[in-house]
Amino acid sequence: MTDDLLEGPILPLLIRLASPNVLAFFIQSMVSIAEVWYVGQLGTLSLAGLALVYPLLMLMQMLSGGALGGAVASSVARSIGAGRTDRGQALVWHALVLALAGAGICSALYFWGGHALLKLLGGRGQILAEAQAYAVVLFSGCVLIWTTNILASIYRGIGDMKLPSMVLVLGVFIQIPLSGTLILGWGPFPRLGVPGAAVSAVSSAAIMTALLLWPLIFRDIVVKLHISALRLQKDLFRDILRVGLPASVSPVLSVLTIVAITGLVGRFGPAALAGYGIGARLEFLLIPLIFGIGAALTAMVGVNMGAGKLDRALRIGWTGAAAAGLLAGTIGLVLAVRPEWWVGLYTEDPAVLASGSLYLRIVGCVYVFQGVGLSLYFASQGAGTVFWPVAAGVLRVIVAVGGALVAVLVLGMGLKTLLFLTAAGMVVFGSVTALSVLFGAWGKPRS
């Protein structure tokens, strides 16, 4: 596999490595679609409560699977590319320790200030109660979500995209019926409502964690979870965190943008909030699909950077960016033209349909920039340098959130202006990230 990563034709290799991920994450998106449909049967207020708290789940997924997970995959890939499998094996233990630490921090932060955050975002009455009930379950069991994502990243770092994808798909087939059973109370089971979705997520993660641990312990693969490698070293933590910590800023900023906009949209009423939540959920669903390509890019770029092959790493990055931009842009444009194909899946409320459709008509047109920027963010993790993707994320917040605050709170403008500023922030993120790679953020190629 390492020889393929270093020498194989780029596009066929990218397709081969990314296809299992993209397929798995596409299937996983069915969980989100199903859960929103289930919750939609409970009413608009329940749907608004889920929309309020859903960004916190996605932030945790992006931190564990994207930021820290990408850093783990990058560290393992660079070690394998440099021929240091012993170092790669030691990194497994360090990754798991960081997973436990990340889960602990997320739980502590939520139980310290999460309720106040949900109120700050506009949660009141039943909407706040639904969001809080979901979040308490989620953050109580989030260690299982963290370990699942970190374990999957270890496999991706050694170039094995199939096993984590297969486990993820199995998790989907468990979670979808389990969510319906617990949310709506099918058969003899109690109707838990919105918290049932969180119980289902944590339960599925427990099964996936066990399935991903088994091969690391008992199978003969490049890196293993072996007690002989349990020697914690500062330089290995540093190698992961020097990429993972700055990379964590990007998903925080992405979610901050959506959360802040969600809070502002809440000023226009529950129907606007529910509609925006349905529309913005498409962006959240695109992130895992792009991550399917990005996870392959992290491994491919990381191995080639570890072997000193910068020119090839850059070609890999641009190939992946083009693929991700095409995927995200196509989905965005299709649903911008026919927003009812998405929003109509979840609601028949005319006011909710109108606000959700408005989001897609404006923001969906620029999803191509999200695809390019996010894929190059993952590729930059493989290159071991994420300053510019993070800087691009900061600029996105300034444009989208800063502009929206002024437009809505100072100038008294409406929902349409807010959404145009959201789209402008997405354009800035993709453009700045791409320009940084073009002008040498990874280093200067020889040719």
Image: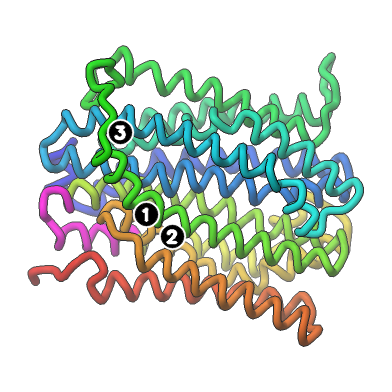
Q: How far across and how far down the image is residue 275, in percent?
A: 78, 60
Indicate the amino acid at tag 2: Leu
Mark found first going from the N terminus, 2 or 3: 3
Q: Do residues under tags 2 and 1 come within 8 Å of each other at their CB atoms?
A: yes
Q: Is residue 115 visible?
A: yes
Q: Residues within 10 Å of mark 2 (few under 14, many from 20)?
A: many
Give percent across and percent down for residue 302: 23, 49
Does residue 309 appear left or right of residue 202 in this picture?
left
| x then y, percent, for residue 229 | 24, 22
Q: Is residue 323 left or right of residue 113?
A: left
Is residue 306 highlighted in magenta?
Answer: yes
Q: Position of residue 196 (x, y in %)?
A: 75, 30
Tell me the amino acid under the disc marked 1.
Answer: Phe
For residue 411, which quarter of the picture?
Answer: bottom right
Boundaries of the magenta span: 305-320
Label 3 to label 1: alpha-carbon separation = 17 Å
The residue positioned 27% from the left and 54% from the top of the image is 384
Q: Which mark is residue 160?
A: 3
Residue ID at (51%, 53%): 287
Vertical position of residue 56 compared to residue 250: above or below: above
Q: Quadrant of the C terminus?
A: bottom left
Element marked by disc 1: helix
Which residue matches tag 1? 378
* Snapshot quadrant of residue 176: top right
Residue 318 among those drawn in magenta:
yes
Residue named by callout 2? 374
